[in-house]
Image (cartoon, grey):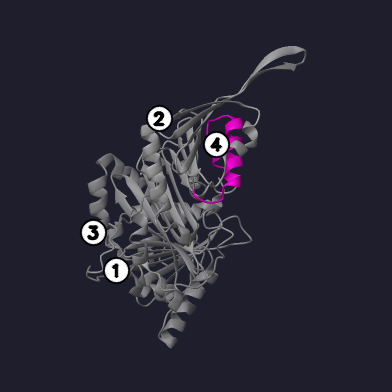
Amino acid sequence: MNIKYLTVITIIILCFIFGFEEISYSLNKVRQNDISELKILKYLPKDNKTVFISNTKTSKIIDDIRKNFETKDQVELILIKNSIFAYLGLDLGTTKLDEIYNNELVITTYDNKEKDKDDILIIFKIKDKKDIDDILNLTYKIDEQNKLIKIFRENKLNYLKYIYRTNDNYIITSSNKVLILDAIQSNNINKNNDKRDISFKEVLNNFRNEHNIFLTNNFKTNELLNNKNYSHKKEDYLVTLFDLKDKEIIFKSYLINNNKSSDIISYKDLDKENIIDKRNYQISIFNNLLESNEYLNNIEISSFEKDIIKELNNKIKQDILFLNSENNWFLIYNKNDFSLDNIKLLEDFNKNTLENNNNIYTVYSNEKLKKEDKIIKQSNYKKIFSVQTDHLNFICNTLINEADIDLISNDFFDLQGKSYPKYFLNKKINFKNPYPIQYKNLSYLENINYFFKNVINTSIVEFKAIIKQSIPEINPFYYAETNLKIF
């Protein structure tokens, strides 16, 4: 296992352990424990790769775990928590977490170019009369306020190498002592200037009523956002919120840029749009076969059918809907964009056409004899079907009935929307479980399952996303939602 993923694993499992609050867009909600005003943020250094912030109360954590998990599962969750703490080098001994933790947590990561793992910085607040000795549980006392202390456990792993306790009872611990020094320096700068990183604070202001937030400005693995029309900026953050429902973790991610007036309310209607989830298609893609066509490579259809889909995808640049259910697929687009007669791969096929209710049905077939190694063989391609309606072209590998044509046509026009001409980028995708594609952004799930293979298993139930951009917008609107099942 590539240990570079361990930080992500740790963050996600800690998010899970520290509980979840329901997502709310209400502006009338009373502002309690504003996450953008947490004092812990004064210790947060700049130029981090990822940041997880939580102010969930321990009482909420305990209630959520008891509500959602049986006693047996709760024991296993405790085992996971203890395993993570042991790897990090923390040891609470017989002390319970809620007796130490004081409802403020920041986990942030930084690139380490010299090693095959990210550096991690963890900051959390502890209760009065608690100290470093309560967290490390060593055989000897080491606690000393405002002193950088090296963590050493003989013959044991400890990812965290250094620890520090501030005079206002914040614990700062890291795999790299430079990060702790940066955190202390960050506090001094904030104290002297009486202000924090404005850009970061403006991003958090969009989510002030949330209690668990994951932020990153590293989009290297996000294929939807690595688009030629979008140039990433330092001020751009991908913000993910968390919810826990019936043993499913729901991740909701938003692209936020603090240099423009967009905020969470801008996404209020966007994440409620039809994201092609009306019917039970395993794969639904509108306006985006992700250019590389790599998703098509994993669908269990013939290579010839994949070549047809790729040919159409290369020739039709906008307003194209792809649907896949088991081994059946459908590709729909505006009739005037491309003629079915121009599909090169079907030029030598036999055609049989019928008309019904103003719809033109065509079946393409090709059966020939060929000679291989002095042996006569039958060359047989699977039949391809097409339907031309008044406004749309359908091409598929199975005959489609008129009821489905009407339903899919309505879906297409809903996805296209009345204002579609204003968008030069208007993409929507939905992948449902079980589907034969592991979404690239979540490939680390295999590492989570490997790391806790005897205790916990995770799988994606559904992934859906919207990305829109119009002139003169510099940055697109991006919303993604992932349902992660925990077994």
Q: Return the x and y of residue 81 as percentages of the image width and height.
A: 37, 51
Find residue 242 and report its image quarter. Answer: bottom left
Q: Position of residue 82 (x, y in %)?
A: 38, 50
- The answer to which of 29 and 286 lies nearer the viewer is 286
| 341 over 112 or under it: above or below | above
Q: Nearer the viewer, mark 2 or mark 1?
A: 2
State which region is magenta.
294-319
- The amino acid type, in three-letter code, at marker 3 is Ser
Q: Are marks 2 and 3 in contact (CB under 8 Å)?
A: no
Q: Decide which of 289, 333 is in the foreground and name it.
A: 333
Q: Which mark is residue 298?
A: 4
Instruction: Please say if 351 is above or below 88.
Output: above
**Who is closer to the viewer here, 144 or 433?**
433
The residue indicated by pointer 2 is 401
Q: Nearer the viewer, residue 253 or 406?
A: 406
Real-space Cα separation, disc 3 to disc 4, in angstroms: 45 Å
